[in-house]
Amino acid sequence: MKLLITGGTGFFGRALLRNWIHDEANGLIIPEVTVLTRSPDAFLKNYPEFTNKSWLTLHEGNILDYKTLPFNKFFTHILHAATESTIGPTMPALQRYDEIINGTRNILDYAVKKNIKRLLLTSSGGVYGPQPENVVGIPENYLGIPDPQDPISAYSMAKRASEHLCCLYYDAHGIESVVARCFSFVGKDLPLDVHFAIGNFIYDALYNNEIKVAGDGSPIRSYMNQVDLARWLLCILDKGTSGRAYNVGSDQAISVLDLAYLVRNNLSPNKSVVIKNDRSSYQGRNIYIPNIDRAECELNLKLTISLEESIKEFIPI
């Protein structure tokens, strides 16, 4: 496999790169990997562990600038994971929508130009819209949608449109694309100082006097470890059925309040959990849990690392 990754320096990308470092240490065969990045030097300065890997090439370019894509190289597969998920919520809604759509269109046009026939799109569980209260885990055949009249739906609607673009490019050009609808994750590369609740709780547990729950703690979430994330994405890229979507995440539900206490109990048992009960600060979903039966049954994928084990990875050494 000769693989091009977009978004390869973000959370998803670093999860994949660390997976290959682990595989390399265990004598496994590593694909030839090229990561598209706006600043190779800055990436290696921040993450020197990825320096001098014979299987890794960093190509300076931007998914939004078509002419900067690596036209001088040959690839068999593309893993398209380029999305500003960290700073995205602070971006203007129209800009966020445009960047997702235009980036996907550029990479699909590139695949046509380079005759690359296999692509994985990392989409989002957000494409389903609000999860019904009576649905324990949302399946891939659920046809609910985000509210198209609400600007806050820009990310989810753009991901939904990106999935449809992949469908259209298969119809027009024969590009086989498979979709990973990704939910919530945790791991050593998760930013602790942005909008991710579990990251905020871990940061508070490590560095602040108390662990703050901004709302009332009632939303229900689940978290997949980044090690499992990487393994699932690569399996779906390799073996997933073209034109099919697979949920990627954990089906083990936990309330945000219980999550705060779980983080506290494992990282800082002497600190208190403070519930701010500020509903105005909450703009997300009440429930966000995938049904992962399709990935388990069709691809034999399993969760191997529990949420508690994932939290314990942050215990200072």
Image (spheres, rainbow, N blue to C red):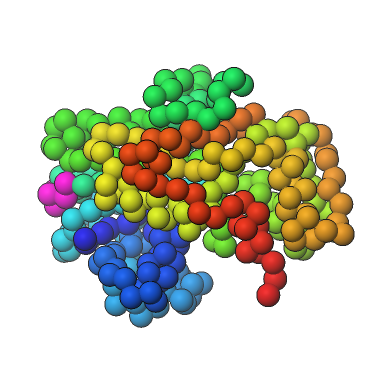
Using residue 309 as the reference point, say whether residue 109 is left or right of it: left
Pick whichever, 147 or 260, lies toward us: 260
Tell me if I can see residue 177 in this picture: yes
Which image quarter: residue 242? top left
Tell me the residue at 62%/47% (across/down). 196
Q: Main secondary structure of the magenta part?
A: loop
Going by the picture, which residue comes out furthest to the bottom?
52
**Whole-percent x, y for residue 190 in the image:** 57, 57
Where 57 falls versus 266 (above or below)? below
Residue nearer the viewer, 299 or 164 = 299
In this rendering, the answer to whether 194 lies above or below 159 is: below
Q: What's the residue at 75%, 30% (across, down)? A: 279
User: Residue 235 location, x and y as percent?
Assistant: 33, 51
* Location of the C terminus (image quadrant): bottom right
Q: Nearer the viewer, residue 309 or 179?
A: 309
Question: What stretch of residues is rendered in magenta?
Answer: 113-117
The foreground one among 260 and 152 is 260
Q: Is residue 166 left or right of residue 43?
A: left
Whether residue 88 is visible here, answered yes or no, is no
